Image (cartoon, rainbow, N blue to C red):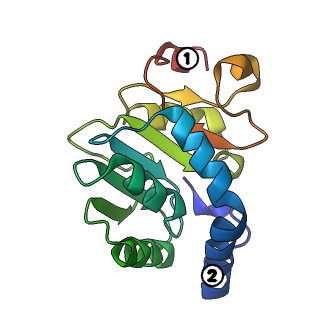
Amino acid sequence: MSNKGYVLGSAPQELQRLILQDRLILRPITERLLSQAGPKEGMRVLDLGCGTGGVSVLAAEMVGPYGAVVGTDQSVDAIAMAKESSRESGFQQSAFCVSSVEAFSSPDPFDIVSGRYVLMYQPSPAAFIRAASRHVLYCMVSSSSLRSSFVAGLTSNYLVGIPGLASSISAI
């Protein structure tokens, strides 16, 4: 989850742009994709490269008060905004930390992993996916060779974990 490839940086005006982009453009698409992934009340969701928390807050709505959402990002400022957004939305089941996917650890696995627009900024998307898969019970990954099995292809640049597709990781 290296920030090195993210040329737009994490200046306050860029983070505000990301919030507007989420609210005005990406939320309906993300909501549809996450709904298809099937998060249920009580599930645990890991949001890699969470930025200002748009996907994390949406996932928190879906998993309810007995679920949990953890968002990670390498930008301290983005994590601060994600925490504030979660607080404003009233989600106490959300936690956020500054971390890369490689450095992140959790004692408990997650049911779903998500990452909106993170693969294109990775020097090795396959390595990122392998690192992400260590945190989830099952993982589904966008890949052109596996496109028919997935909710979204590389053009949408989403990474979403879905129960039942763990064997897909070994093909990458």
Q: Amino acid at mark 2?
A: Gln
Which label number is shown at residue 141?
A: none
Q: Quadrant of the C terminus?
A: top right
- Residue 113 at least partly seen: yes
Q: Residue at x 38, y 50 (%)?
A: 103
- Indicate the position of residue 36 as horizontal and vertical percent values: 56, 34
* Left or right: 128 as drawn, with respect to 22: left
Looking at the image, is mark 2 or mark 1 nearer the viewer?
2
User: Which residue was labeled with disc 2?
Assistant: 16
In the rendered view, tell whether residue 66 sits above or below residue 130: below
Image quadrant where residue 40 sits: top left
- Indicate the position of residue 98 as horizontal and vertical percent values: 40, 65
Dot 2 alpha-carbon crowd within 10 angstroms: few under 14, some 14 to 19, many 20 or more: some
* Left or right: 55 as drawn, with respect to 25: left
Q: Amino acid at mark 1?
A: Ser
- Indicate the position of residue 114 as horizontal and vertical percent values: 51, 44
Give the residue furthest to the bottom. 12
* Left or right: 99 as drawn, with respect to 10: left
Which label number is shown at residue 168?
A: 1
- Indicate the position of residue 71 as horizontal and vertical percent values: 41, 57
In the rendered view, tell whether residue 157 sits above or below residue 3: above
Q: Residue at x 43, y 75 (%)?
A: 85
Q: Which of the two labelled residues, at mark 2 and mark 1, occupies the earlier sequence position?
A: 2
- Residue 117 at least partly seen: no
Describe the element under mark 2 as helix, strand or loop: helix
Describe the element under mark 1 as helix, strand or loop: helix
* Left or right: 5 as drawn, with respect to 64: right
Dot 1 alpha-carbon crowd within 10 angstroms: few under 14, some 14 to 19, many 20 or more: some
Which of the pair 90/163 is nearer the observer? 90
Q: Residue at x 25, y 66 (%)?
A: 92
Q: Residue at x 61, y 74 (%)?
A: 19
